[in-house]
Each structure stands twice: as structure tokens, then as C-alpha cells.
Image (tube, rainbow, N blue to C red):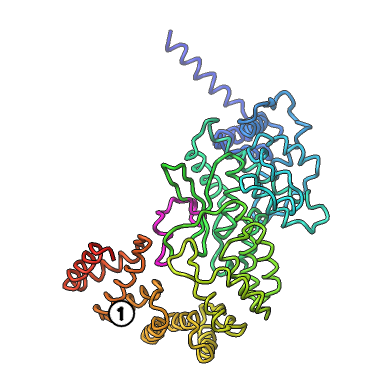
């Protein structure tokens, strides 16, 4: 009897498939090969086969996933064409490819999309309802909707700014909904991080731009709309997108800024997860972000991130010597980070480059002789500009941008030689002059220049470290140990033990064991005496 039933079952399946056309079999096979948790795949399939049974099922599944965390969910079969929500508008945003023209959604379509995503967490923030930049200034950082704040500035001069803002917000909302569709309602923060990484870096394939392109268009790869359109972004650009999505799915993250960089971090007090947005979200060890002069990492507020976007844009204009525009952008950053010492330094230097020396010096005096929060040693630039009346030509030489071409390095070197003759105590000029020799592969000359810099300032840990490395390369172990120990002595005040210094010491210990024992004794004696 069991065999008889099995035979009937097999025969019925063969009969069903025998009566299907080749096209129907193809559609059925494609449907069953879809990733059932991929909204983009389901929508793409529906677009190809909208009138088929499988196409309607795909639409139903996609809709179910999009509304998974919404309290009031509508059945796709109750109202298949969903006049309230324009499915074509949803599909066009979900399946948009890089550099495709943005979908020109109407206010009615945007209203429907916003209703679809009304349960996202960022809707509870005061900043989400701001429409003018002045409204942002008085907000607390925890009330800032990062995407809305940056888009307000991006489109403030457009004819219909709110329409443009809402179009890009709808794109981010749908990204958040796709991530939520793969999460349980009680998902942990770690699960949320995993799904954001999977979606952004693997499914959507957001990437760091090529170095040649980035150097030319770094500001473009910072702007949120450009990052969304191209799926390429520098550390700040992709971190902003990551934070905007995190705000929507209620994932608390910190913003961390090592010198010249930014990444995001999860920190619940017990577990820390670094999310490196330039390397597909991998968890990098924290000590890799620390340097000789960087003993701790600054944690930034979302309000400061808004200001940092202006600083990033200003850096491009500064490099192109458009000082007026750069100063304007630094001024725009001030309401969001009024006491930031780096901003004061950049803006002060900018005013000196504009020959507004008194205005610039007044800003620099506020931070003179004060080590910045994340640094071991003070910024000597501020002190020297004030004490030695450093002006535009000298600063232009120090900040002159160089590329991989030898000619650009030599050009900067010659300008720095002139600056040093005129301002022999200007430490930044000496340091950058030494760097140009090292960039040219002339380590002997670079060493001599660093020695001159060291005569001016023995307390800079970076120069001491470089001198130790250069003397090691020249097999002068005794001198290398001297500068290594001096570096360690300076860093000991902040209990700072960077990886690069440990590696250098290990190398020296291996090459010069006699000195190693002597060094251990010196260190032990210093520790015992409380030095």
C-alpha cells in the first residue's frame, strides 16, 4: 500500500511538470533560486514577471519583508496594487544601480514611502523635523538626525529643497528596512552590525574610491547624496551613511576620530567593536589607530560630525588655495564644534593665509601651548606663528601639497629652504623640510635635518622616534637607543605604549643584545625612582 501511494505521488509530480511549458519551468526555477531574504532580488524578479504566479508571490514576499517590523502590516493580497504605495517607486529605489539617475519621486509617492517607514527610530528625533539650518544649532547632539542635518545644508539653495532631502531620506529608509527584514524584533546590537555590514559592503558593494580619484574628488566622496549615488565614499562619507542607517534601526554607535581619519564604534561598556568603514566594516584592533603622538582616540558627537563634513570640504579648497571659501566652510562648522582646537587652528591659519593676521593670531592664542586632547605633545605651529610672526608665504610652503612626482617634492623643498633662512626657529618648516628629503629617499640628508629640528625642540616624541628609526637604519645602535629611550620617557607621562614603538624596541633588542640589558636596567631604575 505504501509503495502504491508513493508511485501515485511520483506520477502526479511528473504529470505536473510534463504539462508545464519551458517558459513556466524557467520562471519557476528562477523563482526558487532567489534569496528569500533579499528584497532587491524579489522586486527584480517581480519586475521581470509581474503577471505570473511566481512574480506575484515575489512581490508578496518583498512587501512582507519591508513591513516585518511595522506594527500595522497590510496583506499584499488584500490590495494587490496598493494604490497608497507606488510599488514602482519602491522598486526603483531598492534596485537603483550606481550612477543611475535618481528617481524623480513626487510628494505623494514620498508620503507613501514615509508611511511605510514611519516606525523607524530616527522619526522620534527632534532633528528629523528641522527644515532650516538655523533650527539645528540649538539641538542637543542626541536630537540630531544626521542625514537630515547634512541634507539641509546640501540642498538649501535648491528650488524645492525639502523634495530633494526627502528623496534621499527615502533611499536610506528603504536600506534600513531591508536590513531590518533580516533581523528578529529583539535582535542584539551585534546582530544589527553584522547585517548592516553584510548589506552595505557585500550586497550593495559600497567601496573606498581609488586613491587617484579620491585625491581629486575627496569632497564628492564625502557628500551623502554622492556616496549613495556612486556607492563609493571616503571614511567620513561611508561613516555618515553607516550612522544614518544605525539611527534608523536604533543602534547606538560612537564616532571615533584618529588624526586624519574617522570610523564608528560600538561600545556597551563591556564589549567594544570597531567598525572600519573603509575596509568593509571589519573590527580593527584599537591600538592600530594609535600613533607615537596619539595616546587616545577622540569620541565625537553627531553634532560634531556635521561640523566635520564642512572641515573635510574646506581641506579640498585649502589645498587648491581657495582660502576665502575654505574659511567660510570652517565658519559654518563652528556652531557645531565651537571649542574644537583643531577647528580653531585650521581657521586661524586660514585667516593668516588671507592676510588677516590679527584675526588669525587671536584664534591661535586660544590654543597656544595646550596639548590637544588626543595628543601627547602640543601643536608647535600655533606658538611659532605668534612668537615669530609667521605669515602667508611661510605657511603656504609648509602646507604645499605634493604628489608622487619628484618635481612637486623638490618644489616644496626649495620653498622651505627659503622659509628656514627667513624664520630659522620655525619648527614646522624644519620638520617638513626633513620629510621632503625622506620622500626623495635621501635618508642621510633627512637625518641631518631632523637633528636640526631636534636642537630646536627635544620634547617632540615624533621626531625622537623618527631619529631612532633612521639611526637604526644606519646601524648606529647606540644613537638609536638614545632616541628610543627619550621617546619612551616622553610617552611615559601619559602611560602610552604604542605598537610601533614596541616593535622598534624589539628590533633593537634583537640586533644589540648588550644594549638590551643596559636598557632594561635603565628602565627599571627609572621606574623605581619614579622618573
Q: Residue at x 54, y 43 (%)?
A: 252
Tell me if residue 80 comes above or below residue 415 in the rendering.
Answer: above
> Circle 1 sits in a helix, a strand or a loop, which is it?
helix
Tell me if residue 259 comes above or below residue 180 in the rendering.
Answer: below
61 sits left or right of 14 in the view: right
Identify the image quadrant of the C terminus.
Answer: bottom left
Spot occupied by residue 474 in the image (x, y as percentages of width and height): 29, 81
Instruction: Let me know if residue 319 appears in the view.
Output: no
282 sits left or right of 393 in the view: left
Residue situated furthest top in the rendering = 1
Q: Which residue is mark 1?
A: 471
Instruction: Let me know if residue 382 appears in the view.
Output: yes
The range drawn in magenta is: 275-293
Is residue 460 covered in magenta? no
115 sits left or right of 404 in the view: right
Closest to the observer: 54 or 355? 355
Is residue 290 covered in magenta? yes
Spot occupied by residue 322 in the image (x, y as percentages of width and height): 68, 75
Q: Quadrant of residue 325?
A: bottom right
Identify the image quadrant of the N terminus.
Answer: top left
**Majority secondary structure of the magenta segment?**
loop
Closest to the observer: 468 or 363? 363
Spot occupied by residue 360 in the image (x, y as percentages of width and height): 64, 74
Q: Residue at x 52, y 49 (%)?
A: 254
Tally of numbered tags: 1
Crowdedness of circle 1 by 10 Å Cα count: few (<14), some, many (20+)?
many
Q: Quadrant of residue 460?
A: bottom left
Closest to the observer: 71 or 54? 71
Q: Quadrant of residue 26?
A: top right
Spot occupied by residue 502 in the image (x, y as percentages of width and height): 30, 64
Tell me if residue 360 comes above or below residue 148 in the rendering.
Answer: below
Tell me if residue 468 comes above or below residue 17 in the rendering.
Answer: below
Amino acid at each position: 500500500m505504501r509503495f502504491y501511494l508513493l508511485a501515485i505521488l511520483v506520477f502526479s509530480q511528473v504529470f505536473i511538470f510534463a504539462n508545464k511549458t519551458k517558459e513556466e519551468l524557467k520562471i519557476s526555477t528562477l523563482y526558487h533560486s532567489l534569496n528569500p531574504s533579499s528584497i532587491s532580488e524579489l522586486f527584480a524578479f517581480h519586475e521581470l514577471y509581474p503577471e505570473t504566479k511566481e512574480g506575484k508571490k515575489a512581490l508578496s514576499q518583498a512587501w512582507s519583508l519591508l513591513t516585518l517590523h511595522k506594527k500595522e502590516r497590510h496583506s499584499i493580497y488584500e490590495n494587490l496594487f496598493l494604490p497608497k504605495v507606488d510599488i514602482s517607486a519602491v522598486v526603483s529605489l531598492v534596485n537603483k544601480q550606481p550612477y543611475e539617475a535618481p528617481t524623480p519621486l513626487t510628494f505623494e509617492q514620498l508620503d507613501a514611502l514615509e508611511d511605510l517607514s514611519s516606525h523607524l527610530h530616527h522619526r522620534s528625533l527632534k532633528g528629523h523635523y528641522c527644515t532650516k539650518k538655523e533650527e539645528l544649532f540649538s539641538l542637543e547632539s542626541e536630537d540630531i538626525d544626521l542625514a537630515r542635518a547634512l541634507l539641509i545644508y546640501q540642498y538649501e539653495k535648491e528650488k524645492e529643497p525639502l523634495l530633494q532631502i526627502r528623496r534621499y531620506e527615502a533611499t536610506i529608509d528603504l536600506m534600513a528596512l531591508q536590513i531590518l527584514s533580516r533581523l528578529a524584533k529583539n535582535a542584539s546590537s551585534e546582530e544589527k552590525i553584522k547585517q548592516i555590514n553584510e548589506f552595505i559592503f557585500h550586497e550593495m558593494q559600497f567601496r573606498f574610491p581609488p586613491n587617484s580619484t579620491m585625491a581629486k574628488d575627496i569632497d564628492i566622496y564625502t557628500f551623502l547624496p554622492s556616496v549613495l549615488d556612486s556607492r563609493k565614499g571616503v571614511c567620513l562619507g561611508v561613516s555618515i551613511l553607516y550612522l544614518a542607517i544605525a539611527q534608523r534601526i536604533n543602534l547606538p554607535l560612537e564616532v571615533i576620530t584618529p588624526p586624519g581619519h574617522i570610523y564608528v564604534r560600538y561600545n556597551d561598556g563591556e564589549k567594544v567593536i570597531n567598525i572600519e568603514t573603509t575596509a568593509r566594516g571589519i573590527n580593527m584592533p584599537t591600538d592600530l589607530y594609535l600613533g607615537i603622538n596619539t595616546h587616545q582616540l577622540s569620541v565625537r558627537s553627531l553634532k560634531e560630525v556635521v561640523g566635520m563634513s564642512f572641515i573635510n570640504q574646506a581641506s579640498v579648497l585649502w589645498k587648491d588655495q581657495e582660502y576665502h571659501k575654505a574659511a567660510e566652510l570652517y565658519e559654518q562648522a563652528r556652531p557645531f564644534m565651537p571649542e574644537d582646537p583643531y577647528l580653531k587652528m585650521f581657521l586661524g591659519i586660514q585667516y593668516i593665509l588671507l592676510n588677516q593676521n590679527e584675526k588669525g593670531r587671536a584664534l591661535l592664542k586660544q590654543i597656544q601651548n595646550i596639548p590637544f586632547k588626543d595628543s601627547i605633545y602640543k601643536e608647535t605651529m600655533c606658538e611659532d606663528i605668534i612668537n615669530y610672526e609667521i605669515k602667508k608665504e611661510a605657511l603656504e610652503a609648509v602646507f604645499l601639497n605634493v604628489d608622487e612626482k619628484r618635481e612637486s617634492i623638490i618644489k616644496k623643498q626649495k620653498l622651505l629652504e627659503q622659509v628656514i633662512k627667513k624664520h630659522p626657529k620655525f619648527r614646522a618648516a624644519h620638520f617638513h623640510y626633513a620629510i621632503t628629503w625622506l620622500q626623495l629617499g635621501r635618508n642621510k640628508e633627512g637625518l641631518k635635518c631632523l637633528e636640526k629640528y631636534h636642537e630646536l625642540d627635544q620634547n617632540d616624541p615624533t621626531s625622537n622616534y623618527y631619529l631612532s628609526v633612521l639611526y637604526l637604519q644606519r646601524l648606529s645602535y647606540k644613537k638609536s637607543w638614545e632616541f628610543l629611550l627619550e621617546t619612551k620617557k616622553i610617552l611615559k607621562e601619559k602611560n602610552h605604549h604604542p605598537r610601533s614603538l614596541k616593535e622598534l624596541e624589539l628590533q633593537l633588542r634583537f640586533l644589540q643584545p648588550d644594549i638590551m640589558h643596559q636598557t632594561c636596567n635603565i628602565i627599571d631604575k627609572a621606574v623605581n625612582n619614579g622618573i
